[in-house]
Image: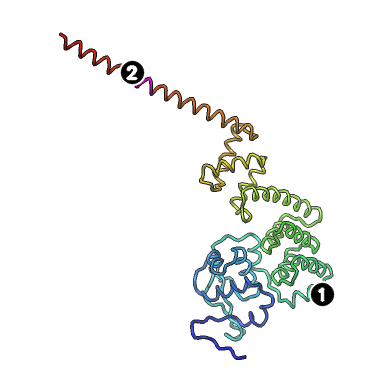
């Protein structure tokens, strides 16, 4: 079969992508790479890439990390941008220099991402060699593979990094992976963020890891209920999560949060405004309002006072009108009497 390339604009794709990575990369990762390479030299945001490729913003971030880990894209020295490495077909091996930056991600990275920028990126062969030499690592990989259902280079490289460079034991990493799978957040970025935190806090035993997982499960359960209550399509943003964490810390009941949510939608044109909702909860706390019944009594007292004020204003207006009418009547009578004389 003969295939011809139509005339038109074209852009280079590293040979390593076609020769070695097509079987490892996902559909979304390939779409993101092609879009980024096509717009080499341009400043792009994750939102722009996600919209053009018809993928979620989280998928864009994972795709960029995947191609960085595969040494197809790399961070430029001076700016937080991704650059395309030249392949052997484009430049001599000793001069594998990056071209101009093609991607600037306007989003803060978690602590784990800082670690990633300097970590070694292992080839699939190197990963396989480490698994062969370490039975515990091999067992962990088999268990994690059951979560994903297939081989995933990005996850494999991350698991080795957490084990060898963060110093977490294989069984501890497996506990972390199982937790992420259980909460439906089996995501490399999220796993690495927790792994870095565990390493920094000295969480290196089963008990400490289990305690932290239980804490996270409880907090996420509260968040999950809020997410369902607010009919949110995805997990809260960092700013929204900060509000939710504060509500849980202050002991606000779900009933009170739901009532505040309804009042927020009534006042904000059926929109969810976390800052407005938080203001309602804080005012209730300061006023000692702890239950929906307390809030209902406050509302009743408020509307009763408002009604009384309106009635008083109406009576005052009627009285003023009567006095004005009487004054006009008296003035007319005075004029009549005056004309008689």
Q: Which residues are magenta?
A: 317-324
Is 114 rendered above or below residue 128?
above
Q: Residue at x 53, y 72 (%)?
A: 102
Is 27 rendered above or below residue 272?
below
Q: Is residue 319 magenta?
A: yes
Query: Residue tagged by mark 1?
Result: 132
Predominant secondary structure, magenta span: helix
For residue 26, which quarter of the picture? Answer: bottom right
Query: Residue tagged by mark 2?
Result: 323
Q: Residue furthest bottom?
A: 2
Q: Residue at x 61, y 35 (%)?
A: 285
Q: Position of residue 35 (x, y in %)?
A: 55, 73
Which SS class for mark 1? helix
Q: Residue at x 73, y 63 (%)?
A: 166
Q: Position of residue 209 (x, y in %)?
A: 77, 55
In the picture, which quadrant includes the C terminus? top left
């Amino acid at each position: 079969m003969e295939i011809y390339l139509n005339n038109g604009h074209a852009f280079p794709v590293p040979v390593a992508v076609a020769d070695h990575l097509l079987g490892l990369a996902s559909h979304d990762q390939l779409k993101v790479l092609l879009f980024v390479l096509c717009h080499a030299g341009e400043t792009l945001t994750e939102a722009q890439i996600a919209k053009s490729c018809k993928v979620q913003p989280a998928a864009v971030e994972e795709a960029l990390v995947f191609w960085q880990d595969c040494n197809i894209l790399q961070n430029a020295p001076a700016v937080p941008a991704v650059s395309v490495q030249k392949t052997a077909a484009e430049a001599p091996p000793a001069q594998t220099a990056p071209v101009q930056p093609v991607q600037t991600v306007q989003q803060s990275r978690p602590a784990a991402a800082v670690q990633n920028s300097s970590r070694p990126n292992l080839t699939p062969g190197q990963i396989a060699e480490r698994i062969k030499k370490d039975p515990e690592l091999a067992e962990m990989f088999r268990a994690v593979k059951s979560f994903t259902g297939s081989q995933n280079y990005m996850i494999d490289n991350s698991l080795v990094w957490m084990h060898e460079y963060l110093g977490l034991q294989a069984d501890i990493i497996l506990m972390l992976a199982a937790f992420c799978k259980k909460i439906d957040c089996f995501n490399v970025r999220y796993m690495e963020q927790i792994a870095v935190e565990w390493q920094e806090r000295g969480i290196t035993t089963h008990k400490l890891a289990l305690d932290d997982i239980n804490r996270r499960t409880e907090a996420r359960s509260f968040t999950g209920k809020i997410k369902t209550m607010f009919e949110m399509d995805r997990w809260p943003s960092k700013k929204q999560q900060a509000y939710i964490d504060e509500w849980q810390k202050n002991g606000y009941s779900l009933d009170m949060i739901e009532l505040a949510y309804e009042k927020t939608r009534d006042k904000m044109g059926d929109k969810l405004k976390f800052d407005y909702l938080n203001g309602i909860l804080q005012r209730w706390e300061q006023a000692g309002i702890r239950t929906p019944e307390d809030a209902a009594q406050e509302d009743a007292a408020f509307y009763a006072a408002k009604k009384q004020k309106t009635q008083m204003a109406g009576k005052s207006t009627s009285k003023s009108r009567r006095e004005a009418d009487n004054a006009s009547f008296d003035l007319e009578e005075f004029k009549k009497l005056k004309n008689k004389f």
